[in-house]
Image (spheres, rainbow, N blue to C red):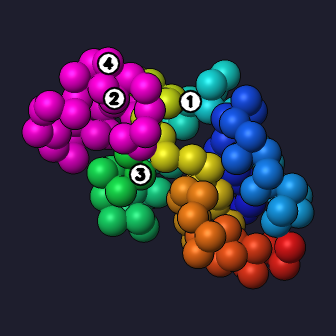
Amino acid sequence: MKKGYILNSCNTCQRIVKEVNWDGELQNIKEANIDETTLDRIAEQSGGYEAVFSRRAMKYRSLGLNEMTLTEADYKRYILEEYTFLKRPVFLVDDEVFVGNTKKVVAALKEKVGG
């Protein structure tokens, strides 16, 4: 299984897709947000919902979330309710999960897909 969860309007997501020569399925999370089962799998392999929650989303501050103490359940709920809270891009390759756009994550993804 090779599936990527990206935001089509995100230049970083587009750059990474090209850089790793991604040939799997891509889902634009703005049009179809990630489903709960997939999110659960990603969070389990990534160290929890907080690990895949994006604090860079503009709504994070505008909703005052930066001033609240959030639980794992809160992180999950916000990600499922609003696509912008999913740290991106997210790639699923076989049994591995790659979350975010750090050089380390991109290099590991590139090595996995042979890009």
Q: Nearer the viewer, mark 3 or mark 2?
A: 2
Distance of mark 2 from mark 4, alpha carbons?
6 Å
- Left/right of residue 62 with respect to residue 66 in the rendered view: right
- Left/right of residue 86 with respect to residue 4 in the rendered view: left
Q: Which residue is mark 2?
A: 60
**Which of 101 and 31 lies nearest the eye of the viewer?**
101
Q: Is there CB contact under 8 Å for labels 2 and 4?
A: yes
Q: What secondary structure do most residues of the magenta stretch adopt?
A: helix
Q: What's the residue type where badge 2 is placed? A: Tyr
Q: Which residue is mark 3?
A: 52
Looking at the image, residue 16 lies above or below residue 61 = below
Looking at the image, residue 64 lies above or below residue 80 = above
Mark 2 or mark 1, earlier in chain: 1
Which residues lie in the magenta part? 54-80
Q: Is 55 within the magenta? A: yes
- Asked whether residue 27 appears in the rendered view, the answer is no
Residue at 60 percent across and 58 percent down: it is 101
Question: Could you say whether the residue bearing mark 4 is in a helix, strand or loop?
Answer: helix
Residue at 79 percent across and 51 percent down: it is 15
Question: Could you say whether the residue bearing mark 3 is in a helix, strand or loop?
Answer: helix
Residue 33's mark?
1
Residue 62's mark?
4
Looking at the image, residue 81 lies above or below residue 25 = above
Looking at the image, residue 62 lies above or below residue 53 = above
Distance of mark 3 from mark 2, alpha carbons?
14 Å
Residue at 54 percent across and 37 percent down: it is 34
Percent across and percent down for residue 4 are 69, 50
Residue at 21 percent across and 47 percent down: it is 72
